[in-house]
Amino acid sequence: MGVVILVLVVIAALSAIGSGVWVATALVSAISRNRGAQTAWRQANEKSNERDL
Amino acid sequence: MDTLLSVGVVAAYVVVLTFVAVRARAARQFSEFSLARRALPLALVFGSLAATYVGPGFSIGFVGRGFKSGFLFLGIGLAYAVQNILVGLLIAPRLRALKDCHTLGDAIGQKYDRKCQIVAGIISVSVCTFFAAVMAHAGGVVLNDIFGLPHWSSVIVVVGITALYTTFGGLRASVITDAFQFSTFAILLPVTLLFVLIFHLDGGAATFAKQAATATAGGLDSTSLIEIIGLVAAFLLGETLIPPYANRALASRTTRISRNGFMLAGVFSIIWFIVMIAIGVAARTIVPDGTHEDHVLLKLVESVMPAGGYALLLVVLVSVVMSSLDSLLNAGAVAFTQDIVKPFSELPDERALNIGRCATIVIAAIAAAVAPAVPSIIGGLLICYTIWASAILPALIIGLLVKRPRPLAGILSMGVGTFVAMSAIIFLFIFPSIIKAPAIIIPALGASLLAYILGHWIDRIKSGA
């Protein structure tokens, strides 16, 4: 019984760590996409400013 | 030397957090500030939801409960998981499907009328502010433990840093930093548990099972049935769709992501409670018996981890607090702009964004001012749960599920729910020995439901339909 409880606890701990890693991966890709979007927005803004001038 | 290391680790953490917040970029439109352009992917919705609900109560509090009453609180925590899964299945997709909806008040306004939206907005802003005060109080306690700073200055540091990135970045910055904070504590706390189980549990599995059984039996003996019912009701309903969660449901990229985000967050809560309670149970062989339950986690880590590990845990605790606080500040500011200011005047987008930013700062300032008066973390949370569940939930859930909700029913339910909840809380403070805190949610919720039925009935007779 004790072993079963402990195994369940260890599985829960590993699942929580797995969730943390999954979200961290999504965070890294969201931040990289953001940088791309930011650059595109800045370039579009600069172009429109040039046109206005 | 140890203090220097702690300061260094916390400073490094703040630098990385600032980098992440800056990369999340400043919101340029109100729709970005309030709903992150409705483009959040599943992992971020899930991570942000979990980071928001895992506050001091679900980490420090649950470790303490595991220490005192074993796995009793896992049974009570299951109510929380069920709530999240039910919200995912039944409510979140319906909420996400509403058009031009930024807040719960918006949803209530669309289902009932504008008056109901304003009342819902006032309740949302008040509850978010008080929740934020509880988080600020907890943040103050943690920083006070680390650096020995006075409580008020610790509160100002935690609230100041959180308000800074939330004010500029809005919901997107809140969600991105939540994801970072979630990853930090979802990895480090289970690693702490594994470290304790592998290196410090004398007697192995048999000792762990024996400690768990003894603590659970003790917990069952010392908790009355009415307390258990009250706690289950509080966990089932108290945090249901509070404004930060609703904002994440509304900001999901699709209705499916909204549904799955809540369901995954529900499943994760079971995993999380098992880990936290197991840390508490494992601590029973290491931490002295009379230790106050709020200090079990700190004492355990202090006893078993090297200095670097202790500093990392402090970072985890700061993450836990800030990830909940930023969501509450943003949700309160968005509710203020959308539900209280916008119904009275047409706002251009830029002005709405500026009002949202100012509201974030004001709510943060009020939360910081109220924080020292918060009685305790769990006590403060139970007060918030009671007000929220009775004031908003019946009107919101019935409104989303039925075809023709009646405005009178909505306004009566919100008014009576708030009044009874506030009266019960005042009664609790005057006569603490007569009623138990977790139990007050039951009469308040019952009164709100009755008021809803009465309002529906009167409105139906008046309109002759």
Image (cartoon, rainbow, N blue to C red):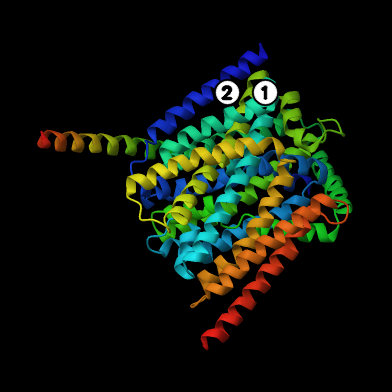
Label 2 near label 1: C-beta < 8 Å? yes
Front-most of B312 and B379?
A: B379
Dot 2: what SS?
helix
Q: Residue furthest top?
A: B1
On screen, B452 above or below B16? below
Viewer can see residue B435: yes
Q: Which residue is mark 2?
A: B10
Asked where in the image residue B312 lies, by quadrant, the reply is top right
Q: Residue at x 50, y 37 (%)?
A: B361
Front-most of A12 and B440?
A: B440
Q: Where residue B146 is drawn, which disc sits there?
A: 1
Q: Residue at x 87, y 56 (%)?
A: B434
Viewer can see residue B323: no
Asked where in the image residue B153 lies, by quadrant, the reply is top right
**x and y, in percent, of residue B267 in the image:** 59, 53
Mark 2 Cα within 10 Å, few/some/many (few <14, many 20+)? Answer: many
**x and y, in percent, of residue B308 in the image:** 63, 20
Indicate the chain on which mark 1 is placed: B
Q: Residue furthest bottom?
A: B464
